[in-house]
Image (cartoon, rainbow, N blue to C red):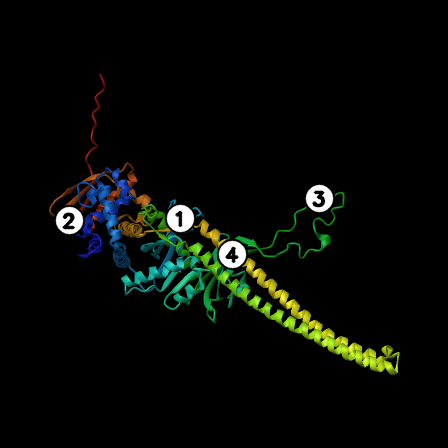
Amino acid sequence: MALLDEAVDLPDEGPDERLIRSQATTRSKLLQTLLFMPVFGVFRPYALRSYSGDGLGLLIGRDRAFGYQHTERFLSQLSRASFDTVLEQSLASWTCSLWSQDEKTTYYVDGHRKPVYSQAVLPRGLIGKTGQILGCRALTLLHDEQGHPLLVSTARGDQHLTHGMPALIDRYQQANPDAHLPSIVVDREGMSGPFLQAFAADHTVVTLLRSNQYKGLDDFEQVSPFTPHEVDGEGCVLTDIASAQYALTVADQPEPLMLQVALMRDYRRCQPIPDADPLADISYWDRPWADWTDPDWQPSAVPPTPTQPRLIAVVATGVMDNAAQLIACYKRRWAAQENSFKDFLIPLGLDVNHGYGKSPVSHSELDKKRNTLQAKLERLGRWQRSAYARSQRASRRYERLYQGLRDYTDEQYACLNEWLMLMSDNNPDFTRSAEFKREHHALKEAVRDRQDKVHEASRDRDAEFQKADRYARQQCYILRELEDAEAEERQMFELDNRKDQIMSLLVVALTNLVMWTRDQVFPDDYEHATWIRLQAFFRLPGWVQRTDTDCYVFLRAFNDTAMNRDLAQLCETVNTRALQLPDGLRLHLALSQRPPPVISITPPP
């Protein structure tokens, strides 16, 4: 509760005067209401309209719980006061001090998207549970290796994990300056060259290489011999591992980023070898259909397609001790992240949306398309002007060469005719002489060379003109696409995520509180118990008696003998540890021995 009291301590000046003028005790109890609502199955303030129990009010120190309007107004006031940033810092500091973490702790980052169904156009993302692209909110969560959620951030649904993760890490380290995150495990969505390049200096990032980034062992360097990793009861190797290196090309970087790789071959899931022909080593006459003309021929199956074990590559930006440790570190992601989502966060209301306030924003996809078309339009305009200018230059060169050809032809043939007439006066058969043929052939070759230059200039003129004409047509079509896009454009709205961020932070805080309670006071058999199993204990009916120094809670027993045994052990542990409530009273738990009330029913006459 000290965390809530510290977080709810607002400054003297703020955007909402009514929130500032309210008493600190009232703000603390309202924040506790928002925190403990999921324990009683109330996930939205609106659900308080139909809540008739006494547990929520008793837990926050009131006779009855707050109503819907008061709680919803308080949540709205907190969001307008940017309380999410204050609560985020407090939660990060508290979770870091709650769980023992050292320099060897491995942290896990994962993304989660929850859909928001609205008639307005919202930023969209891939919903993992359904595989659909819907309007949603994108959550980025930070866990430790035990599955304890440490911090969460909320953003628009099209945010990529590589953009949300750096901001989340920075906020966590700002709240805990002494905390260092040496190793961070992220799923294959974090397989980005610039992202890994930026994080490689301060953190060791462990992720999974995408299957389209490699085809086989030839794509890796310095591959060590494979050693068995998993073996079944009969001694058959299920998986084997090896260490290697992978050169990842990074945009705008001269040198590739060298990654340490742990290769694992899974023999339980074999896949066909690409471009492998099962009949490649079999001659034609030995193939099953070779003698199909034989009356006694019976078809038989062709040989099976050659397969190979599935190759999985786990990469790290830092130096690894061995391949087995790196693979075990990545496999821990399912227990540390996925089970935390499934067992605690989602049952406690992480998937519930709060607040649907929207503000108009530009359509990012349409802006991207518009910018692409505008750039193409400008590029085609430059090409058209350049092509037309080249066409004009080629046209002038053609006219100059053509006029020169005419002048040259007239002049040379005039000289040839004069020389011919002069020579014919002495020799009437001079036109059939070798000298005349030689001079005439030389003149034709000279004229032909000039004609070739004229034709070349004509071809250049026509080609450049056709280019300019094609570029002009393309500009008209692009303008049509732009006008169609403008006509079909719908206003996009971005959700106000401050309410949702506050409630997500409170869900993370409640999850840590439940996990800490499970680890500290529940029997050893509940070491891996989920919220579905624990909620029966948290929702037990009973009654409370208070004195000046003690608070006695009498719980009604279960109908199950085993659960009553666990409940008795729970009560003994709490009483032995002498736990104190936030108001300073010592907590005592006991099983109620009061018999159930007898309901007297008078039969009708």
* Distance from Cα at disc 4 to Cα at disc 3: 62 Å
Circle nearer the N terminus (3, 2): 3
Circle nearer the N terminus (2, 1): 1
Q: What amino acid is labelled 1 in the image?
A: Val
* Distance from Cα at disc 3 to Cα at disc 1: 63 Å
Q: Are marks 4 and 1 in contact (CB under 8 Å)?
A: no
Q: Which mark is residue 492?
A: none
Q: Which residue is mark 2?
A: 585
Left/right placement of residue 526 relative to residue 546 reads right
* Mark 2 burial class by Cα count in 10 Å: few <14, some 14-19, many 20+: some
**Can residue 268 be seen?**
yes
User: Of residues 293 and 434, which is closer to you in this image?
Assistant: 434
Q: What amino acid is labelled 2 in the image?
A: Leu
Say which element carries label 2: loop
Circle nearer the N terminus (3, 1): 1
Q: Which residue is mark 1?
A: 121
Residue 114 drawn at (x, y percent): 37, 48
* Distance from Cα at disc 2 to Cα at disc 1: 52 Å
Q: Which residue is mark 4?
A: 478
